[in-house]
Image (cartoon, coloured by chain):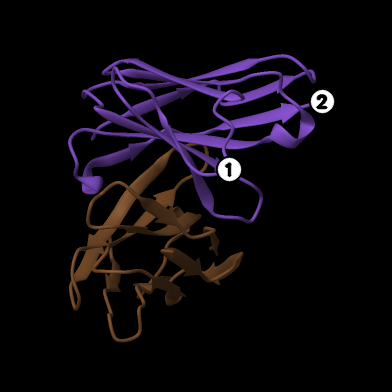
Chain colours: A brown, B purple
Amino acid sequence: GDSVTQMEGPVTLSEEAFLTINCTYTATGYPSLFWYVQYPGEGLQLLLKATKADDKGSNKGFEATYRKETTSFHLEKGSVQVSDSAVYFCALSNRAGNQFYFGTGTSLTVIP
Amino acid sequence: GAVVSQHPSRVICKSGTSVKIECRSLDFQATTMFWYRQFPKQSLMLMATSNEGSKATYEQGVEKDKFLINHASLTLSTLTVTSAHPEDSSFYICSARTGQNNEKLFFGSGTQLSVL
């Protein structure tokens, strides 16, 4: 079945460091891929998405490229800030939209 | 942006009691709501999908008589954990969407259930 494998955390970085959180997926067909972020005490929020191969999703300095050949959707940011401290979830949705699969979440802490 | 309110955020109950968790879409009509469960360091697991006015569709392995889901209106879905036991202790999250587009999927902040 469809699934998402996400890099385990926690991840601790200094401010302005480069961030990569790995995400790979297994799916039949052509899924849509998402990154969600959960700030402390809040619900999950959509961070970015990509709906087809080679699409790049971007938002708030974060980027992820839908790589069909490597079945990956790694999240990157060139320079993290303290305010980026949160839990990040990679997710996959099948084309029919009736199934949604999440990774285990990666906790990121950015220290000044 | 759209807001989904989930209540309570944390609940502690005795074994054998029932607990109700509410999920409300505050500024949109949620035709579909999803309920997830998350164990520590594991993925969110989809428990059930509910469409307004119809019975919920449960995922394999989820006991429908234990996890009662009601989606009586376009803005409210409830999950009732009946006769809760310590193994039901978990983090429960709801999400809501309008239409079929999963890009318009909004999440509640979750409920941490602890059964003593």
Residue visible at 54% across and 58% down in the picture: A104
Helix, strand or loop for disc 1: loop
Residue type (three-letter) at the residue carrying disc 2: Leu
Q: Which residue shows up at 42% across the image and 55% down it?
A: A101
User: Which residue is tagged 2?
Assistant: B116
Discs 1 and 2 share one subunit: yes
Can you tell which quarter of the image residue B30 is in?
top left
> Horizontally, is A54 left or right of B66 in the view?
left
On the rendered structure, is B112 left or right of A7?
A: right
Relative vertical location of residue B85 with respect to residue A92 in this rendering, above or below = above
Where residue B33 sits in the image (x, y, percent)?
A: 35, 31
At which x and y percent is residue A10? 61, 64
Q: Is residue B23 visible?
A: yes
Give the class, few, some or many, for how many residues have Cα within 10 Å of label 1's Cα (few <14, many ≥20).
Answer: few
Residue type pointed to by label 1: Gly
Give the image location of residue B20, x and y in percent.
56, 16
CB within 8 Å, label 1 to label 2 = no
Which image quadrant is residue A31 in? bottom left
The numbered dot on residue B61 is 1
Quarter in which the N terminus of chain B is drawn: top left
* Among numbered discs 1 and 2, the one appearing first in the sequence: 1
